Image: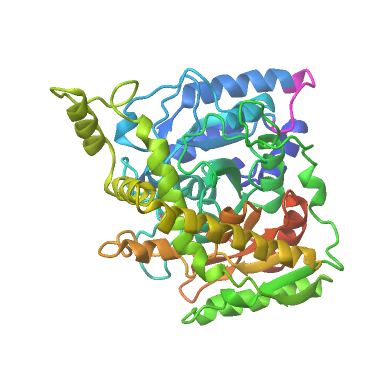
Amino acid sequence: MTDLTSLTLAEARKGLADKTFTSLELTDAHLSAIEKARVLNAFVMETPDRAREMAKAVDEKIARGEGGPLAGIPLGIKDLFATKGVRTTACSKILGNFVPTYESTVTSQLWRDGAVMLGKLNNDEFAMGSANETSCFGPVGNPWRREGSNTTLVPGGSSGGSASAVAALLCMGATATDTGGSIRQPAAFTATVGIKPTYGRCSRWGIVAFASSLDQAGPIARTTRDAAMLLRSMAGHDPKDTTSVDIPVPDYEAAIGQSVKGKRIGIPKEYRLDGMPAEIEKLWSEGAEWLKAAGAELVEVSLPHTKYALPAYYIVAPAEASSNLARYDGVRYGLRESAKNIIELYENTRAEGFGAEVRRRVMIGTYVLSAGYYDAYYLRAQKVRTLIKKDFEDCFARGVDAILTPATPSAAFGIGEKGGADPVEMYLNDIFTVTVNMAGLPGIAVPAGKDAQGLPLGLQLIGRPFDEETLFSLGEVIEQAAGRFTPARWW
């Protein structure tokens, strides 16, 4: 029998339905793989007993013909999603050993559809980072390595544990979140598929908040079809989240393989950055040609406010983070440092509990929201955000169905290689992705090739609001043309 961990989610679903193997066998295969790959540090909490219990229960349902759309599929859950009875820390010391008494809406829908939880996945602390180096559990390793090198690379962030685990075949798919590129950038760095749905498509209830107007949950998977299957279960209206949109969830999987003939693909001239590596430029051109060969029409478009997106994002996101993270005060839950009075309690707890990057962003956010600076920074950034959104609206109004861009400005880099002296160097990793969050649009990253050192590179497709189906059909074209690639095992 084929190694069960090498199956795609769609192949595993068929094998389970045909009774070729059981969910318990599939789960055990992945639990064994996780044990052998601890050097990657992708999981911060393994839940083997719960996984086997869930798998046995699903096997009984499958035997009765009652299995749901994800019946028996083992998944990893980013440590930002509240999981009832299982420690959830956002990879921050300040949450300590917080064990929620409730389940996030997204994960509850996955369990409703029969999925199995293998454990909690590493991420940047409070999702603040582009390399998964800010976690209190330590950095995550990318299963990919440069040819001829033993340097451990970053998997991207903040959903680095999710991307690493999927790429290393430790789970069949993973939940992730994206505030400025945290699904798409790690997917590009690990040759996995990641989609950030339209803002409001997936409930944010039960997900630890970073920046509430930007955060959105989505899946990381091995193929576009697998991602489509996961998103269908994750998406849907939730009355507990006031930003959740009450519109029907389509069958995303049905979009896979649909003709893209006549689709108009925008190529934004502003994304041709000075100093862009030739291999990124080449990959972008190749991707455009693949879509053209499949019958799509290429049109040059302009998104004139793109250059302001990154600075505006790094005002809006820290401002919202400053507000959201005010609740971590040592009083109600999580870490509580000793102190003589309430002020000292706040100061000691927050100084000890938050890592350097989180403290930096909270300080930036508090500054831009303070009296005298609010209008100069936060208000102006929100006006820029409106203009960025209008740029996209103008493109779509001219009949453009989707926009093709690079996903990242480079391939994965080594742990500790960037951002040490200058945090802006790390922030520049989000240059192609933040516009999508600022405009609330859906974006998908699909593996499209490799660089000169054998590392994966991805392309990004940006769609109209709530038109994830078009992204899946276009992403499948790129996936078929590029082929699938997996890392050589070294762990």
In depth, the one of 214 and 490 nearer the eye is 214
Q: Is residue 159 above or below residue 274?
A: above
Most common secondary structure along the magenta stretch: loop
Q: Is residue 66 magenta?
A: yes
Q: Is residue 59 visible?
A: yes
Place residue 148 in its image quadrant: bottom left
In depth, the one of 469 and 34 nearer the eye is 469
Q: Position of residue 337 (x, y in %)?
A: 20, 26
In depth, the one of 166 and 395 nearer the eye is 395
Q: Is residue 397 above or below residue 31?
A: below
Q: Position of residue 381 (x, y in %)?
A: 49, 58
Q: Is residue 79 magenta?
A: no
Residue placed at 54% from the left, 47% from the top?
A: 214
Residue placed at 66% from the left, 29% from the top?
A: 238
Q: Position of residue 320 (x, y in %)?
A: 44, 44
**Quadrant of the image for the N terminus?**
top right
Identify the residue at the far left of this view.
Answer: 340
Q: How is the image coloured?
A: rainbow
Residue placed at 71% from the left, 42% from the top?
A: 229
Place residue 219 in its image quadrant: top right
Q: Position of residue 247 (x, y in %)?
A: 77, 37
What is the magenta range? 62-70
Identify the residue at the far front of this view.
Answer: 372
Residue placed at 60% from the left, 44% from the top?
A: 218
Image position of 437 (left or right of 371)? right
Q: Is residue 37 visible?
A: no
Q: Is residue 166 above or below residue 481?
A: above
